[in-house]
Image (cartoon, grey):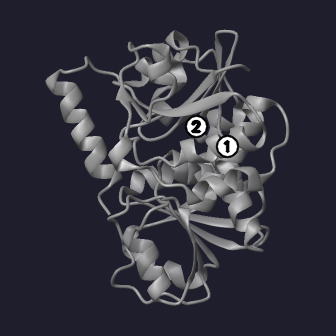
Amino acid sequence: MSESLFAVFGNPVLHSKSPQLFKSAFSELAIEANYTRIRPSNAADVVGIVKQLNILGANITTPFKTQVIPFLDSVSNDALKIEGVNTILNRSGKLLGFNTDYLGVSRALRGEGLHLQGSKCLVLGAGPAARAAVYVMVKEGANVKVINRTTENALKVANDFGCEYALLSEIGREIKEVDIVVSALLPDANPLAQVEIPSRITFLDANYRSSNISTFARNSGCMVISGEKWLLHQAVASMEIFLEQEVDVEVMQRGLLNNLNRKNLKICTPYDSWNDVYTSDLVISAPKNSNLFTSILHEEISKAFEN
């Protein structure tokens, strides 16, 4: 695995802490590899760049988890059911898709001493992250209800996984009945803003930076499990797929303490030299010195360092 390259693909993607996690593991395990962030133009571009750069393993984040599926050579049953791929293994040019998000949910909760069997759970959202949460919660014996701004999407999730759904207008009543809430909402969203929530509830937030709903829950006396824990555990599961061996969570956890340095960012395109790509912080799939490249770079920096 000499000078092997791994990457996370997303839009936006510069904010991702995945490189810190994987680089920490590479260092601890004495693996000669690097991990970067790539902003592709679309889902087909994800696959094209993986093959072009011979990226051995990739992680996929918003908005490409579902979009990338048709371009892969095979997809695991878990990922097909969840309708989202967050991990791609490049096996001699054949791209295999997996989902480890659901393991991130169960392991993050278990790490805090919580068990899903018999628990009453509410999942907010209906995208791939929410579907992963519902999938594992139902699988492990929880009583699950889904609420989403668009009711038909909540109904689809409920039908797909054999659980229940409720209307957004009913959230004030539903929240009083649950033990665990998983929020897969955008950072600015908080449908609980006008609701009194019991302090006994545990919240797991998909966001690993500050979000309105996690701040509100914490201020209401609830225990909040940061999205960093979700990120960490799904990353460990991805690493185990890449290496085909068990990985100690602690070798990646230390990477959470490392922050991206804005002053020394190294930016390139997929068509720059191998050394530039291998050592980059961000790869932008757009012609260098073009208006598009400049616009994307400005957007990525503003979102990565907004707080």
| Res 226 quadrant in image | bottom right
Q: Secondary structure at mark 1?
A: loop
Q: What's the amino acid at mark 2?
A: Asn
State the image quarter where residue 117 is shown.
bottom right
172 w.r.t. 242: above or below:
below
**From the viewer's perspective, is residue 183 above or below residue 270?**
below
Quick check: marks 1 and 2 in contact, CB under 8 Å? yes
Q: Nearer the viewer, residue 101 or 164?
A: 101
| On screen, residue 181 above or below 175 | above
- 162 vs 274, left or right, is right
* Observer able to see residue 137: no
Residue depicted at 41% across the width and 48% down the height: 15
Closer to the camera in the image, 14 or 100 = 14
Q: Secondary structure at mark 2?
A: loop
Residue at x 70%, y 10% (from the top left corner): 92
- Where does the image place residue 21, in percent across and percent down from the top left? 62, 47
The extreme left residue here reads 291
- The part of the image, by quadrant, that contains residue 142 is bottom right
Query: According to the image, label 2 marks what residue?
Result: 86
Left or right, residue 41 beside residue 22: left
Q: Residue under circle 1?
A: 100
The crowding category of the residue bearing disc 2, from other C-alpha atoms within 10 Å (few below 14, some 14 to 19, many at least 20), is many
Q: Residue at x 50, y 35 (%)?
A: 65
Of mark 1 and mark 2, the one earlier in the sequence is 2
Identity of the amino acid at label 1?
A: Thr
